[in-house]
Image (spheres, helix red, strand yellow):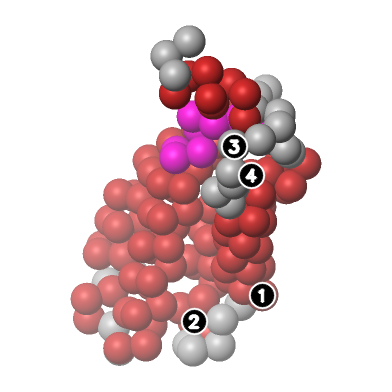
Amino acid sequence: MSWSRAHWIVGLLTLLMFPLTGQYMRHVADVPHLDAIPRLIFRSRHLLRLVAGVANIALSNSQPFHRAQRVASLLIMISPPLLIAAFFIDPARGLHSSTVFRLAMYSLWIAGVILAIVNRPRKLSNARPDARLDAGISRGV
């Protein structure tokens, strides 16, 4: 399976689960009537899953070239399942986040740092394998 397809599947499944967990919050957990801290934890985990799903969808149109990009892609792909687990684990813990949630947040942060370094703007040169391709596209070749 290609990286693009894997990101698309993970992102799509995460986005499809978003309204389901919203209904869970409303009808099962009765989040609107909870105390402030559990309500905050439910809503934050819910919204962070949306962000992780959108990040996966955004990466579904790219193919990682460098090993570091593949590591970042993998870290972004594992974050939605971790956030789904944290959605159910963390509200009972109050302000003490679970290890699962911290792993999800660290994986997204590390992936962001890796992608910021690898994809930093550079002067056009032969330093990147795709630089010549980019130059040809921009000239209309």
Front-most of residues 137 and 73: 137
Q: Is residue 72 left or right of residue 16?
A: right
Q: Amino acid at mark 4?
A: Ser
Q: Which residues are magenta?
A: 57-65
Tell me which numbered mark, 2 or 4, is placed earlier along the sequence: 4
Against 51, residue 64 (above or below) is above
Spatial CA span between label 1 and label 3? 42 Å
Q: Which circle, 2 or 4, is nearer the viewer?
A: 4
Q: What is the number of the mark on residue 113?
A: none
**To which residue does mark 1 refer?**
99
Q: Residue at x 66, y 75 (%)?
A: 99
Mark 3: which secondary structure? loop
Mark 2: which secondary structure? helix
Membership of 6 in magenta stretch:
no
**To which residue does mark 2 refer?**
92
Residue extending furthest toward the top: 141
Spatial CA span between label 2 and label 4? 31 Å
Membership of 59 in magenta stretch:
yes
